[in-house]
Image (tube, rainbow, N blue to C red):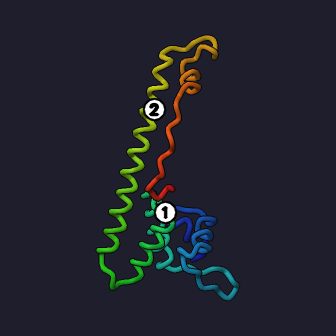
Amino acid sequence: MRIGELASAAGTTVETVRYYEKEGLLPAPQRSLNNYRSYGQAHLDRLRLIRNCRALDMTQDEIRAILSLADDHQSGCGPINELFDEHIAHVDERIAELTHLKTQLMEIRQRCLRARPDAEDCGILHGLSEMQVEERQERHTHLG
């Protein structure tokens, strides 16, 4: 199949296919006599795996690791389980960060329970001006 057919079958774009090829996540296809890329079922399966990992918010490094483990039929499920456990821990940390952010936003929002005619009287703007910014903690998630 050609690149457009592959992209369509995987629910992605041609640009995404080319990007994954460039990044080494998707192997280069064979070329036909007219120099068109020629993809097979293995490309489609791998592209779907990559897309599903991205849908789970996995980084390229995590995807590379999964692909490497998938290619190594001797490794078993243990290393894949460990990788998923690490990713779940990253998600838990991100949820904690977002919960803290939501609390901060709600506290500022409470300063202005009704619309005021003049922005100078806006409780949110005053809250933003008076807010003590906390030191950003070093993230221990894959988001950096």
The relative height of residue 68 versus residue 109 in the rendered view (above or below) is below
Q: Is residue 36 left or right of residue 92?
A: right
The 10 Å Cα crowd at callout 2, few under 14, some 14 to 19, many 20 or more, is: few
Q: SS at mark 1?
A: loop
Residue 50, x across and y down, in percent:
47, 68
Which residue is identified by label 1?
A: 59
Task: Please state which of residues 126 and 6 is positioned toward the viewer in this rendering.
Answer: 126
Cβ atoms at labels 2 and 1 below 8 Å apart: no
Q: Does residue 4 show up?
A: no
Task: Indicate the amino acid at tag 2.
Answer: Gln
Q: SS at mark 2?
A: helix
Q: Which comes before the other along the chain, label 2 or label 1? A: 1
Task: Please state which of residues 137 and 80 is positioned toward the viewer in this rendering.
Answer: 137
* Furthest residue in direction right, as rendered: 34
Residue 79, x across and y down, in percent:
33, 74
Q: Tell me which corner region of the image, top left, top right, bottom left or bottom right, holds residue 83.
A: bottom left
Q: Tell me which corner region of the image, top left, top right, bottom left or bottom right, holds residue 69.
A: bottom left
The relative height of residue 13 versus residue 46 in the rendered view (above or below) is above
Q: Does residue 77 show up?
A: yes
Task: Indicate the amino acid at tag 1.
Answer: Thr
Q: At x 62% / y 70%, what residue is drawn? A: 18
Q: For the residues marked 2 and 1, what is the alpha-carbon distance in whole angstroms?
A: 28 Å
Which residue is identified by label 2?
A: 104
Which label sits in the foreground, 2 or 1? 2
Question: Looking at the figure, which quarter contains the N terminus?
Answer: bottom right
Q: At x 55% / y 65%, what residue is drawn? A: 8
Task: Please state which of residues 121 and 114 is positioned toward the viewer in this rendering.
Answer: 121
